[in-house]
Image: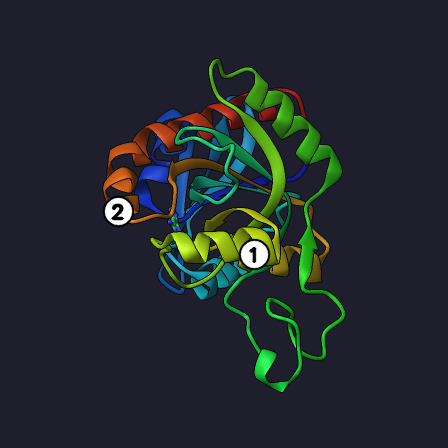
C-alpha cells in the first residue's frame, strides 16, 4: 500500500498525528511542510494545509503529484448547519461543494461552477463507511454523513446557516474540504473529510470555536487511528 495523506488546516488539527508519528522526516514544498513517517505502523504523509481553499488545493496537489499518496483523509473542525448537530458531534463527508461559488446573476445555480459538469465532489464509499464505523467508537457523539460545504468565510450568522442548509443541503461548513475534494476528483484519488463540530456558525461561533477546537480535533484524529487499523 502507498502512503496515506492525513491533512488538517491548522496546527491543532495535525498536532495529535505529529505527536504519535515515528521516524519522521520533513520536507518543505512551496512553504508547506510535509511530515513523512509511520503512524501506528502505517506509512503516512501529514501536512497542515493552512486555512482556505487555495492553500488546501495546492497542498493536495503536491500530495498527489509529488508524494503519490493513495488516499486522502482530511480531519478538523467545522461549524454545524444541520439542526440535529451539537458541538462535538461528527460529520463524515458524503460529498463536498463550494458555497461561495456564485454566478447566479448570469444564470448558474448558486454553488455550481459555470461550464463544468461536476460541482459536487463525492467522497469514496469505503472510506465513508470506515469513517462512520470509526465515529461510532466514540461515546456520546452523533455521527452524521452528509454534504460538507466550503468557502473562504468563517460563518457566524444564523440567516446564512439557514440558507446553506436549505438551499445547498449542507450539514456543516468549513473552509477547505471542497478544495481537497475538487483536486481528489480531478486526479482520481479517493478522499474523505471528517469534521468535528466546534460551533454552530452563529453569533457565538468565534467563542465556541476557540473553546472546542482542541477537543474536536482530538476526536477526529482518534477516528483516524481506528481507520488506519482497519483499512
Ligand atoms: N470552521 C469551524 N467553524 C467554522 C465556521 N463557523 N465557518 C467556517 N469554518 C469553520
Vertical arrangement, residue 18 with respect to residue 186, above or below: above
Task: Give the CA distance from mark 2 to mark 1.
Answer: 22 Å
Residue 197 seen anywhere in this rendered image of the structure: yes
Q: How far across and down, in percent of the image, does residue 217 sit? A: 38, 33
Residue furthest out toward the bottom? 106
Vertical arrangement, residue 146 with respect to residue 176, above or below: above
Q: Which mark is residue 112?
A: none
Mark in front: 2 vs 1: 2
Between 21 and 56, the one nearer to me in the picture: 56
Q: How is the image coloured?
A: rainbow
What element does badge 1 sit on? helix
Residue lying at 26% horizontally and 47% vertically, measured from the top left: 206
**Ligand 1 within 8 angstroms of badge 2 C-beta:** no
Q: Is residue 230 left or right of residue 125?
A: left
> Which residue is labeled 1 in the image?
178
Q: How far across and down, in percent of the image, does residue 126 sit? A: 74, 33
Q: Which mark is residue 206?
A: 2
Between 208 and 37, the one nearer to me in the picture: 208
Q: Give the position of the N terminus as an image quadrant.
A: top right
Displayed quadrant of residue 192: top right
Amino acid at each position: 500500500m502507498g502512503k496515506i495523506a492525513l491533512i488538517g488546516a491548522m496546527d491543532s488539527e495535525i498536532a495529535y498525528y505529529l505527536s504519535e508519528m515515528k521516524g519522521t522526516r520533513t520536507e518543505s514544498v512551496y512553504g508547506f511542510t510535509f511530515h513523512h513517517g509511520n503512524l501506528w505502523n502505517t506509512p503516512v504523509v501529514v501536512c497542515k494545509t493552512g486555512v482556505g481553499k487555495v492553500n488546501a488545493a495546492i497542498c493536495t496537489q503536491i500530495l498527489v503529484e509529488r508524494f503519490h499518496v493513495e488516499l486522502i483523509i482530511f480531519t478538523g473542525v467545522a461549524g454545524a448547519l444541520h439542526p440535529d448537530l451539537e458541538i462535538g458531534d461528527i460529520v463524515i463527508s458524503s460529498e463536498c461543494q463550494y458555497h461561495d461559488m456564485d454566478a447566479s446573476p448570469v444564470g448558474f445555480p448558486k454553488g455550481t461552477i459555470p461550464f463544468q459538469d461536476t460541482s459536487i465532489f463525492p467522497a469514496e464509499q469505503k472510506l465513508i463507511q470506515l469513517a462512520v464505523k470509526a465515529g461510532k467508537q466514540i461515546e456520546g457523539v452523533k455521527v452524521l454523513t452528509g454534504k460538507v460545504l466550503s468557502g473562504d468565510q468563517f460563518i457566524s450568522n444564523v440567516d446564512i446557516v439557514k440558507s446553506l442548509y436549505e438551499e445547498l443541503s449542507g450539514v456543516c461548513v468549513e473552509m477547505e474540504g471542497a478544495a481537497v475534494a475538487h483536486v481528489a476528483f480531478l486526479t482520481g484519488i479517493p478522499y474523505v473529510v471528517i469534521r468535528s463540530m466546534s460551533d454552530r456558525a452563529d453569533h457565538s461561533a468565534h467563542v465556541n470555536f476557540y473553546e472546542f477546537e482542541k477537543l474536536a480535533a482530538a476526536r477526529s484524529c482518534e477516528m483516524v487511528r481506528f481507520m488506519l487499523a482497519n483499512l
